[in-house]
Image: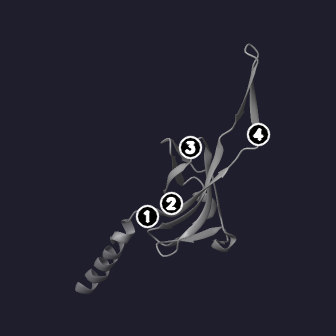
Amino acid sequence: MKLRFFPASFLLLCLATPITYAKTTCSIESFHSIDIQPDTSAALVDKEHDQIQIKQKPSMRCANVVFTTSLTRSRVGHEMSDKFEATFFDNTKGTSHSISFDDDAVKAGYVRVGPATPVEAYVCFTTADAPIKTISCDVN
């Protein structure tokens, strides 16, 4: 009887380990903000007062981001494009819409990320008047 009980209890123990249920967390190690200036302008004509006001679109806010995750594994690169959120200095938030990695970091579309394997990515968010204050990530 004990021989049958041991393999069953061992299997149950392996399936119930904390690693099995641990939520993967993502941490931003560092980021460097990059602002892409628009090359288009708009003119607002006020005929009543004989004035022309030139307006320029806000800058596209992007950043070089170095991040890690609590569990090491390969992740599909393009699936992380909307997993970053920027908080701007005016306290508005924007979700990332594009991500790119160094060619050396991508192998067959996969990027290996973990606690001892930080990855650098170029992430773009949205246009905003205020620069990026902080960036967070939710990569599973």
Query: Tag 2's secondary structure?
Result: loop
Q: Amino acid at mark 3?
A: Ala
Sequence-wise, the earlier of marks 1 and 4 is 1
Which residue in the protein does label 1 denote?
24
Side (left or right) of 17 relative to 27: left
**Picture quarter containing residue 33?**
bottom right
**Residue 76 in view (yes/no):** no
Name the disc covering residue 40, or none. Answer: 4
Q: Which residue is mark 3?
A: 130
Circle 2/circle 3 CB separation < 8 Å: no
- Front-most of 89 and 114? 89
What residue would you read off at disc 2? 139
Residue drawn at x 76%, y 39% is: 40
Image coordinates of residue 132 in percent, x first then y, are 54, 50
**Who comes first in sequence, dot 2 or dot 3?**
3
Inter-mark Cα distance, 4 to 2: 34 Å
Local crowd size for mark 2, using a 10 Å CA cut-off: few (<14), some (14–19), many (≥20): many
Where residue 120 sits in the image (x, y, percent)?
Answer: 59, 67
Q: Amino acid at mark 4?
A: Thr
Amino acid type, label 1:
Thr
Q: Nearer the viewer, mark 1 or mark 3?
A: 3
Alpha carbon distance from label 2 to label 1: 8 Å
Do residues under tags 2 and 1 come within 8 Å of each other at their CB atoms? yes
> Which numbered disc flags the more N-terminal residue, 3 or 4?
4
Q: Position of residue 68 (x, y in %)?
A: 49, 67
Estimate how packed mark 3 is, as few (under 14), some (14 to 19) or many (20 or more) residues with alpha carbons within 10 Å: some
